[in-house]
Amino acid sequence: TAGDRLVTMQKQLTEKNRMIAETLDELRGLYQSLDNDLIEAKKLQQSLVRERHRVFETAELSLLLRSSGHVGGDLVGFFEISRTRLGLFAIDVSGHGISSALMTARLAGYLSSVAPSQNLALEKQGAEYVMRLPSRVIEDLNALVLDEMETEHYFTMVLADFDLGTGRARLAQAGHPHPVVQRRNGTVTHIGRGGLPVGLIPGARFETFDTVLAPGDRLLLMSDGVVECPDPHDVLLDETGVSEML
């Protein structure tokens, strides 16, 4: 009868609603677990930037790492070469999320600030460490990624050897946004020729170039998260916008 069919349909609907509710509870639990893992991953990635600000005798250094999500493929850092020399780097791994963040963690080990013997950018001369030519370091990283890392990721970067005494910086650029020099009078210049990303082409060559900072000048290394930031009309900030902001 029609009444029996209605009762049966009501029972079926109740059972389906129960199954949906249970599935939603399981999904909420899974989401909460994943969210907790991502929060911990964010803490770990942020810990890769061991020091955010330091004032030296002749210079001041500030670092900022902020992902669009919990974690991402960006990394910034520095390592001391000697009392008057610093290594600076900015890295942006392709993609987003956990796999990109894992790649940044591995790359951080190759540019270690606490273990000079493990830092690919440094070589020992006598009792001291000196920095290798930035372009050669990036070429070695390119070979390492292609030969030893089983990954589809590639990355862009800028690596600099900065002399705190003279203001001279030797830099190499690998597909990363151009470094910016702002002079004391406000003039802004984007330097470098771009270069290839790291981990795409075997045997790729990179170029080292120089700039000199005078008292009051600034050097800015940034990821494409800055230059590709859109305004409310989806117009990208671009290098022109960065210059205007500075």
Image (cartoon, helix red, strand yellow):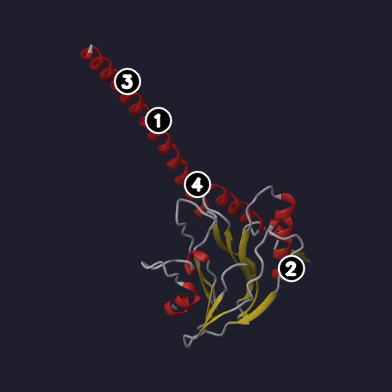
Secondary structure under the numbered disc 1 in the rendered image: helix
**Which circle's residue, 3 or 4, is located before the other in the chain?**
3
Q: State which mark lies toward you, 4 or 1.
A: 1
Q: Residues within 10 Å of mark 3 (few under 14, many from 20)?
A: few
**Which circle's residue, 4 or 1, is located before the other in the chain?**
1
Q: Are marks 2 and 4 in contact (CB under 8 Å)?
A: no
The residue located at (44%, 46%) in the rendering is 39
The type of residue carrying mark 3 is Glu
Q: Which residue is mark 3?
A: 15
Residue 171, image x, y percentages:
65, 73
Does any portion of residue 83 appear in the rendered image?
no
Q: Is 15 situated left or right of 123 in this image?
A: left
The residue located at (49%, 69%) in the rendering is 227
**Which circle's residue, 1 or 2, is located before the other in the chain?**
1
The type of residue carrying mark 2 is Arg
Quarter-of-image position of residue 26: top left
Residue 32, image x, y percentages:
40, 38
Task: Say which mark, if any, is on residue 205.
Answer: 2
Q: Residues within 10 Å of mark 1 (few under 14, many from 20)?
A: few
Residue 55, image x, y percentages:
51, 72
The type of residue carrying mark 4 is Ala
**Which circle's residue, 3 or 2, is located before the other in the chain?**
3
Task: Say which mark, if any, is on residue 26.
Answer: 1
Q: Which residue is mark 4?
A: 41
Nearest the eye: 194 or 19: 19
The type of residue carrying mark 1 is Glu
Q: Are marks 3 and 4 in contact (CB under 8 Å)?
A: no
Q: Are marks 4 and 1 in contact (CB under 8 Å)?
A: no
Q: Residues within 10 Å of mark 2 (few under 14, many from 20)?
A: some
**Which circle's residue, 2 or 4, is located before the other in the chain?**
4
Image vertical order of residue 229 relative to residue 167, above or below: above
